[in-house]
Image (tube, rainbow, N blue to C red):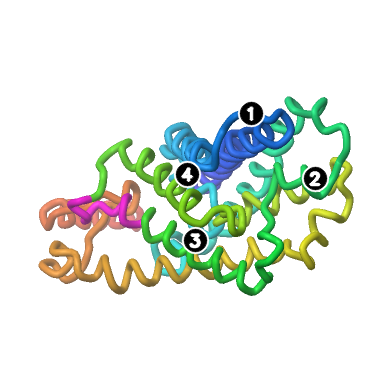
């Protein structure tokens, strides 16, 4: 059963990340190669909408991480099992590759030449006057903010967090806000799969080595920065925010249903513990 669940979760991550990349790269293509009349805030909103749609469609299966920085960040603080991290990341990169491929398919007639300028329809690069180390720090900070926001908005003990499907809209708006605030500096990858998957695609689609060599081998920046930022954001949230939520302070220890993540009261916890002991006794007999 566990293998079947993991397989379904991985398929969900592939589809969710593909949806994100299709929305995001398609709006960039619409602006760059078709000259659509859309400003930066509009572009950021469409990226955010892609996140929201991915969560709505796939969140019920895998949680819609759709981002290795989220997956690694949650695992680093014990909120996600490490054994699932590698399968999730491979699934996210695969989904990003497919999402970029779908965008290229519908816009392929518009790519008359394959240039350094139009390859950034699919992946990010920093402004010319920003060094790679500085760009990495920008990505680190933006991703830390993203992961803190995601954890806060999906925290069952946070009374101010949006409930139900409202979290999907809120996370999408957070991504849009990050893009509007500082996205032009580095293209706001804030997601290693979102950048690396499309780089693999463009390398195979005719751009050659340029996706990896451009801007002084920039390719590592949207990988390293977001991964470190994701861990930092998760640690900051868990140690300095979650630890001081009123219910955590009252109970001293958060009790969760390990299947659903729902917070349990003492009676529910005792019932589940009794059922577990009963099952173990039956198994021994």
In the image, the segment drawn in magenta is 151-160
Left or right: where does residue 206 sit relative to residue 237? right
Earlier in the chain: of badge 4 and badge 1, it is 1
Labels 3 & 4 near each other (Cβ < 8 A): no
Q: Position of residue 249 (x, y in %)?
A: 14, 70
User: Of helix, strand and loop, which one carries label 3?
Assistant: helix
Earlier in the chain: of badge 4 and badge 2, it is 4
Residue beneath the point at 47% across and 61% down: 81
Left or right: where does residue 124 sit relative to residue 11? right
Closest to the camera, between mark 2 and mark 1, is: 1
Above or below for 252 versus 2: below
What distance separates the C-alpha of mark 4 from that of mark 2? 25 Å
Residue placed under numbered mark 4 in the picture: 64
User: Of helix, strand and loop, which one carries label 2?
Assistant: helix
Earlier in the chain: of badge 3 and badge 4, it is 4
Give residue 228's quadrant in the image. bottom right
Closest to the camera, between mark 4 and mark 1, is: 1
Q: How many residues crowd around disc 2 within 10 Å: few (fewer than 14), some, or many (20 or more)?
A: many
Residue beneath the point at 54% across and 52% down: 67
User: Of helix, strand and loop, which one carries label 1?
Assistant: loop
Residue beneath the point at 56% across and 39% down: 20
Q: Position of residue 129 (x, y in %)?
A: 68, 66
The label shown at residue 202 is 2
What distance separates the C-alpha of mark 3 from that of mark 2? 24 Å
Earlier in the chain: of badge 1 and badge 3, it is 1
Residue placed under numbered mark 1 in the picture: 36
Earlier in the chain: of badge 3 and badge 2, it is 3
Q: How many residues crowd around disc 1 within 10 Å: few (fewer than 14), some, or many (20 or more)?
A: few
The mark tally for this picture is 4
What distance separates the C-alpha of mark 2 from that of mark 1? 22 Å
Q: Main secondary structure of the magenta part?
A: loop
């Amino acid at each position: 059963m566990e293998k079947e669940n993991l397989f379904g979760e991985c398929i969900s991550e592939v589809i969710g990340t593909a949806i994100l990349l299709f929305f995001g790269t398609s709006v960039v293509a619409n602006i760059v190669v078709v000259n659509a009349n859309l400003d930066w805030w509009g572009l950021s909103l469409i990226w955010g909408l892609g996140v929201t749609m991915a969560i709505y469609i796939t969140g019920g299966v895998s949680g819609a991480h759709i981002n290795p920085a989220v997956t690694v960040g949650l695992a680093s603080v014990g909120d996600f099992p490490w054994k699932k991290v590698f399968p999730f990341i491979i699934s996210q990169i695969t989904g990003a590759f497919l999402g970029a491929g779908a965008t290229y398919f519908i816009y392929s007639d518009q790519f008359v030449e394959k240039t350094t300028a139009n390859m950034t329809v699919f992946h990010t690069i920093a402004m010319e006057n920003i060094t790679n180390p500085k760009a990495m720090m920008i990505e680190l900070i933006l991703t830390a903010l993203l992961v803190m926001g995601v954890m806060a908005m999906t925290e069952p003990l946070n009374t101010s967090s949006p409930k139900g499907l409202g979290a999907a809209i809120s996370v999408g708006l957070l991504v849009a806000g990050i893009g509007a605030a500082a996205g032009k500096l580095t293209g706001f990858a804030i997601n290693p799969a979102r950048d690396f998957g499309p780089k693999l695609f463009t390398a195979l689609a005719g751009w050659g080595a340029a996706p990896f060599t451009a801007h002084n081998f920039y390719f590592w920046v949207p990988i390293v920065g977001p991964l470190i930022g994701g861990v930092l954001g998760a640690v900051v949230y868990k140690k300095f925010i979650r630890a001081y939520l009123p219910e955590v302070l009252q109970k001293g220890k958060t009790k969760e249903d390990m299947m659903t993540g729902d917070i349990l009261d003492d009676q529910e916890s005792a019932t589940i513990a009794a059922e577990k002991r009963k099952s173990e006794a039956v198994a021994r007999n």
